[in-house]
Amino acid sequence: MTTLDITRKPAPRHKADDGEGSVQVHMDPRLTIDRAKVFAVYGKGGIGKSTTSSNLSAAFSLIGKRVLQIGCDPKHDSTFTLTKRLVPTVIDVLEGVEFHTEELRPEDYVYEGFNGVMCVEAGGPPAGTGCGGYVVGQTVKLLKEHHLLEDTDVVIFDVLGDVVCGGFAAPLQHAERALIVTANDFDSIFAMNRIIAAIRAKSKNYDVRLGGCIVNRSAGVDQVDRFGEAVGLSRLAHFPDLDAIRRSRLKKSTLFEMDDCPELDAVRADYLALAEQLWAGGKVHEAQPMKDRDIFDFLGFE
């Protein structure tokens, strides 16, 4: 059974505490993802994490990898460009069987999407009623019980934005690399700085490491690169603000299915290159986040 232990300091140490005043959320240590490369995608709310995650999943599948994408947002729209619909969530399915997990089959909550990508939407409790970390834990537990992780090469967690709670932190307990999606603006970089701090805190207890940032929906990259140079963070990719990308979401399609959009050729090539780069391993970033006041001054304009 998945256990969820939420306590404030002082608390029994799990290797080490995450940070002063932190809320500790510890999953059952047996719920590990052993074989696959696991990536957790973070970023400010509305920055395009689901678009990035889904097209990265598609790219991994096109270079021959077996991919599982797990949406971790109660909106459960992470995978709809892969599956062409809003699929039922794990929490909905569990409620339907009164949380008797032995009654579930993989086809009850796992859906095949573009090019064989397996898609799961964890969902979440109603607002204000529970911890999203529990749902992530239950999702991983089900996947392990049904042996769905044994034949998977890549797992991508698409994590909800702008929330610092169990649902936000739980994927970091499973991931090998955390990726941050950002734009070339103050709010996105400010959020990225806070996420860097969260990843550093979790890296004390778990194997997750910062893998770099992906610039999305931006014409330029000057502010992101200036921030990255200051804190020790590299840019992995840059995806421009193209209307064809917006239309792909409206069409419920990955970018690789938008055959009538030659302007996306370079973007598709960049996604394939990013998948190859991440599969090869890539650099671990020991970025040092700025204090809130310092980043405000650093990114401010006269």
Image: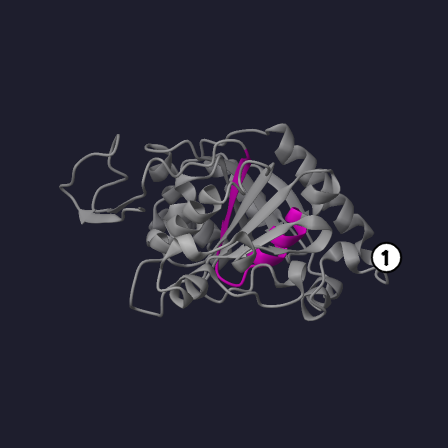
Compared to residue 247, the image places residue 220 above or below, namely: above
Outermost residue to the front? 103
Crowding near the residue tagged with mark 1, few <14, some 14–19, many ≥20 C-alpha atoms within 10 Å = few
User: Foreground: 301 or 127?
Assistant: 127
Specify the amino acid type for callout 1.
Answer: Pro
Magenta segment range?
36-57
Q: Position of residue 97 (x, y in %)?
A: 40, 64
Residue 155's quadrant in the figure? Answer: top right
Outermost residue to the left? 10
Compared to residue 269, the image places residue 48 above or below, namely: below
User: Foreground: 192 or 269?
Assistant: 269
Q: Is residue 260 magenta?
A: no
Which residue in the structure is indicated by mark 1?
262
Residue 288's quadrant in the figure? Answer: top left
Q: Position of residue 40 (x, y in %)?
A: 50, 45
Q: Is residue 53 magenta?
A: yes
What residue is drawn where x is 78% and y is 58%? 257
Q: Position of residue 154 (x, y in %)?
A: 59, 39
What residue is drawn where x is 55% and y is 35%? 37
Is residue 173 something one can see in this rendering?
yes
